[in-house]
Image (cartoon, grey):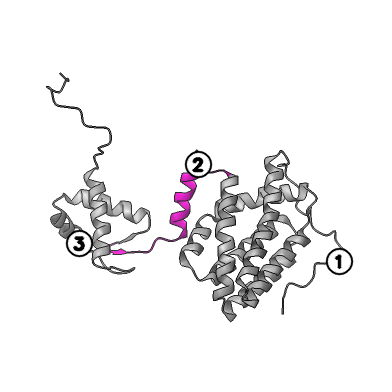
């Protein structure tokens, strides 16, 4: 007989949820059922408490939790409204998930290879004149980079422009959300690339090839060009993982002052 008077112990597979968790789920279902959009108001907290047969503090805790992840927005003196979570909210979740987990740089690189190759293909299909102009500008900025940090910033801007041209909000949001982690990966990859003897000129050429394929509307060529560029990143990462992970000078891998500059960034 068990200590609780003979009642069988609850199976471990059964999980209890708190009232706050139940109300949180209820609020999400309410938003979906009423097809509420960003800016639409929720019923008042007292009304929600009555609807869900819970206390007012429980409703307020649930609202606070959803506001923290960007799904709701609280306003002083008026009702809570629905919001759209942005990249910063998702970025915090990704960062917390990576801390102490097995999501290492190799897996981040795998993610890039999957998403960015797909982005390039979609960009070739969906690009607009305005997006091509933005890509031209991003490539020009990349071409003018003279230090590793300038290169990383320009590289982020170029790949973000490709994601916008792809015209898929989920791809763009996910890539943007992971940017703090990918920026760290970029630095490590660059160190490894330079330590293998790699230079910036071939990196810029790879980006130019990607843009040319996107401009031509050639989906296969765009995907192949992005894949080739990310193969450069993989060379740098493998060098870093193999022990060549020491930092390089800010201008290492760049032409020396007075040397011939890379070809113009525009592709016509």
Q: Earlier in the sequence, mark 2 or mark 1?
A: 2
Is disc 3 surrounded by few (<14), some (14 to 19) or many (20+) residues within 10 Å?
few
Q: As rendered, which of 33 and 73 lies closer to the eye?
A: 33
Q: Look at the image and tell me in which quarter the C terminus lies.
A: bottom right
Q: Which residue is mark 3?
A: 44
Residue 102 is inside the magenta segment: yes
Q: Residue at 53%, 43% (x, y): give it.
A: 103
Q: Look at the image and tell me in which quarter the N terminus lies.
A: top left
Q: As rendered, which of 144 and 228 lies closer to the eye?
A: 228
Residue 221 is inside the magenta segment: no
Judge from the rendering whether residue 80 lies leftward or rightward of residue 2; answer left or right: right
Is residue 137 among the parts visible in the rendering? no
Q: Residue at 56%, 74% (x, y): give it.
A: 125
Q: As rendered, which of 207 and 222 lies closer to the eye?
A: 222
Give coordinates of residue 123: x percent, y percent. 57, 71
Residue at disc 1, secondary structure: loop
Is disc 1 surrounded by few (<14), some (14 to 19) or many (20+) residues within 10 Å?
few
Give coordinates of residue 33: x percent, y percent. 24, 64
Residue at disc 2, secondary structure: loop
Q: Are marks 3 and 2 in contact (CB under 8 Å)?
A: no
Q: CA distance from mark 3 to mark 2?
A: 37 Å
| Mark number displayed over residue 99 | 2
Q: Which residues are magenta?
A: 76-104
Q: Which residue is mark 1?
A: 260
Above or below for 85 versus 196: below
Give coordinates of residue 87: x percent, y percent. 47, 59
Q: Residue at 70%, 51% (x, y): give it.
A: 190
């Amino acid at each position: 007989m068990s200590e609780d008077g003979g009642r069988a112990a609850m199976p471990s597979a059964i999980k209890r949820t708190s009232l706050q968790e139940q109300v949180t789920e209820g609020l999400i279902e309410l938003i979906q059922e009423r097809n509420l959009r960003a800016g639409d108001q929720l019923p008042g907290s007292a009304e929600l408490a009555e609807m869900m047969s819970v206390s007012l503090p429980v409703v307020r805790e649930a609202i606070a939790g959803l506001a923290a992840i960007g799904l709701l927005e609280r306003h002083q003196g008026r009702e809570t409204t629905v919001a759209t979570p942005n990249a910063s909210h998702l970025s915090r979740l990704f960062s917390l998930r990576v801390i102490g987990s097995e999501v290492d740089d190799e897996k981040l690189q795998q993610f890039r290879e999957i998403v960015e190759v797909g982005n390039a293909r979609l960009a070739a299909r969906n690009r607009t004149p305005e997006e091509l102009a933005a890509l031209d500008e991003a490539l020009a900025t990349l071409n003018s980079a003279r230090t590793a940090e300038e290169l990383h910033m320009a590289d982020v801007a170029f790949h973000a422009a490709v994601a916008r041209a792809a015209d898929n909000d989920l791809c763009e949001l996910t890539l943007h959300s992971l940017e703090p982690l990918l920026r760290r990966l970029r630095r490590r990859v660059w160190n490894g690339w330079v330590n293998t003897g790699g230079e910036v000129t071939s990196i810029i050429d790879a980006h130019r090839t990607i843009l040319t394929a996107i401009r031509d509307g050639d989906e296969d060529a765009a995907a192949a060009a992005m894949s080739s560029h990310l193969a450069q990143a993989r060379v740098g990462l493998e060098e870093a993982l193999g022990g060549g992970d020491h930092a390089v000078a800010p201008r290492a891998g760049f032409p020396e002052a007075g040397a011939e500059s890379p070809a113009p960034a525009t592709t016509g």
